Image (spheres, rainbow, N blue to C red):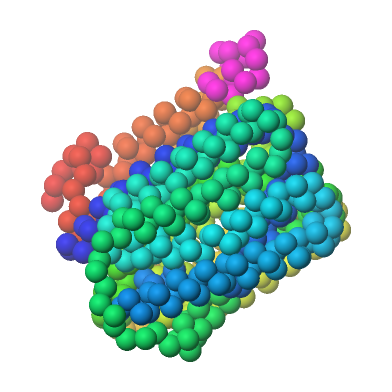
Amino acid sequence: MSQFRNVFRGLSWSLIAQVVMSAGQFFYAALTARIFTPAEYGGFAAAISLMGILTLLTTTGLPSLVLKETELGLRAVTKIRLCGLLGGLLSAVVFVVLVPGWLHILHAPEGNIYVGLLAVGQALSPSGSIESALLRRELKPKKDAVALLVSFIVACGCGGIMALCTRQSWTLGVFVALQPFLLTILSRIFQSNKRLPGQHLKYRTVMQFTRKITAQNTGFYLLQRVPEWIMSASLGSSALGQYSRGASLAQMPGAALNAALNRAMQPYWRLVARPDVADRAMNDAATLSAGIAFPIFGIVAVNAGALVDLWLGDGWEQAGALATLLAIGAGLAIPFGGLASSQEMRGNFKHVRRAQLSMAISLVIPLLLLFATHVVWWAAASVAISSFVGLLVMALSSATSHSGLRVRVRSRLLRRLASLAAWSTGVALIGLFAGLEAAKFVSTASRLTEAAVQIAVAGVVSAFVWLLTFRWHETNRILRQRGVRLPAFVSGRSS
C-alpha cells in the first residue's frame, strides 16, 4: 500500500508539471498559429519526424536501462552518459545529411529553415533524457517536476518572444534546441546520490536491452507517423500542417498524461519482485489511467471543432474536423501506453510485439483509402482504429498467467475499460448538448463567441456529471482499495 501511495504522490507532482506544460504549449501554439502558415508548420512537422526516427534508432533505450537496472554504480552511469553523448552527436550528423532528401520526399521544403536548430536539439536530447531518468531513479518526483517545468518555461518563453519579435518561422526550432540543454543541466544539479564505483556495465548488456526497446519504440513511432508521411507525400505540407495542428490538440494532453504516468511508475517496476503482484498492479494502473484519460479526451473529441476555432482562429477549419478522431485515438493510447511501458520495463516484449503487429495490420485499409482518395479524414481515422486495436490486443494478452484465473483477469480488465469508455462518452455528450444549447443564446454574436460559450458550458457540465457519478465508478473502488482517500462528496461514504 505504501508503495502505491508513493507512486500516487509522484504522479501528483508529474501531473502538475505536465498540466502546466500543456497549458503553455496550448498558448504557444495559439500564438504561433496566428503568425505562421499551415505550410510552415507542415515543414516543421516533417523535419521533426526525422528527428524522432534518428533518436529512436540511436539512444531511445538508455533512459529505460537507467530505470530498469537493480544496481547502477558510477562506472555504469559514466558509460551510459558517454553512449548518450556519442549517440546524440552521431544522430545529429546523420540528421543534417538526410533531412534535405527527407523533406523532398514529403513535399515539405519549408522545413529546411529549421535544420540548424533541430540538429542542436538532436545532439542534446539523449543527454537530457538520461539525466532526467537518473533523477527519477532517485525517486525524487518533486525535483524532477521542477526540472521539467523550468526547462520548458524558459525554452518556450524564449521561442515565443523571438517569434513575436522577428516573425520568422525558424524560431519554431528554438524550443527544440534549448529545452534539452536546460533539462540536462537542471537534472544533473538536482541529483544527490553519491554513487560507488560499482561494476562495469558491459556494452553487450546495454545493447541487448536497448536493442529491444529501440525496436519496439521505433515500431510505435512508425505506426504514429506513417499516416502523416503518406498524407504529406500525397497532398503536400499545407495538408500536413492542418493535420499536425489538429493532432496537437489531442497530443498535448495525451503527451502530458503519458509522461506523468510513465515518470511516476517506471522507477518502481524494478522493485516489484513477484510477477503476479506486478500484473495486478499493471491492470489497476491501466484502469486508473483510462479513468483519467477517457473523460478528458471524450470532452475534447465532442467539442473539437469549437476548440480549434477558438484556439487557432481562421484558416484552420480542417484541423478542427480532424481533431475529433485524433482525440479518440489519443485517449485510447493512454492506457495502452501504460500497459506497454510496464511490460517493457519488466522485459516482457512479446505482448508489445503482438499489439504492434495488430496495429500495423489495422492501418492497411484506411491508409490505402487515404492514398486512393486523397481524403485527409482517413489519416485521422487510421489513428483511432489502430489505437483501439492496440489497446484491445494488449488488454487480452497482458493478463496474468501466474494463477488459474487468466480468462477472468482478461475479462475483468476489458469490462473495466468498456465501462470507462461508455461512462466517459455519456459525460462528454451531456456536456456537449448543454454547450450547444447555451451557444444558441449568443447566436447573433461572432463565431468565436459561440465557440467560447459552448466550450465553457460543456466543460462545466461534464465536470459536474463526472464528479456526481465518480463514487460508483471502478476507478474510485481501486483507489479506496489501495488506501487513497478522496473527499467524501467525490468518492462517497467511507466503507
Q: Is residue 469 above or below residue 348?
A: above
At 17% from the left edge and 62% from the top edge, which residue is drawn?
2
Q: Is residue 328 above or below residue 306?
A: below
Could you tell whether 120 is left or right of 457 in the image? right
Could you tell whether 46 is left or right of 71 in the image? right
Quarter of the image where the N terminus is located = bottom left
Position in image of residue 105 (x %, y %): 83, 60
Position in image of residue 418 (x %, y %): 45, 57
**Observer-nearest residue: 336 or 219?**
219
Residue 382 visible in this rendered orientation of the protein = no
Residue 273 visible in this rendered orientation of the protein = yes
Residue farthest to the top, as pictured: 444
Could you tell whether 332 is left or right of 118 in the image? left
- Number of residue marks: 0
At 43% from the left edge and 88% from the top edge, which residue is drawn?
202
In the picture, residue 242 is in which quadrant?
Answer: top right
Position in image of residue 330 (x %, y %): 55, 52
**Observer-nearest residue: 471 or 232?**
232
241 part of magenta stretch: no
Could you tell whether 477 is left or right of 100 in the image? left
At 53% from the left edge and 40% from the top edge, which residue is drawn?
156
**Observer-nearest residue: 14 or 247?**
14
At 21% from the left edge and 64% from the top edge, which residue is drawn?
3
In the picture, residue 158 is in which quadrant?
Answer: top right
Q: Which residues are magenta?
A: 440-453
451 part of magenta stretch: yes
Position in image of residue 327 (x %, y %): 57, 47
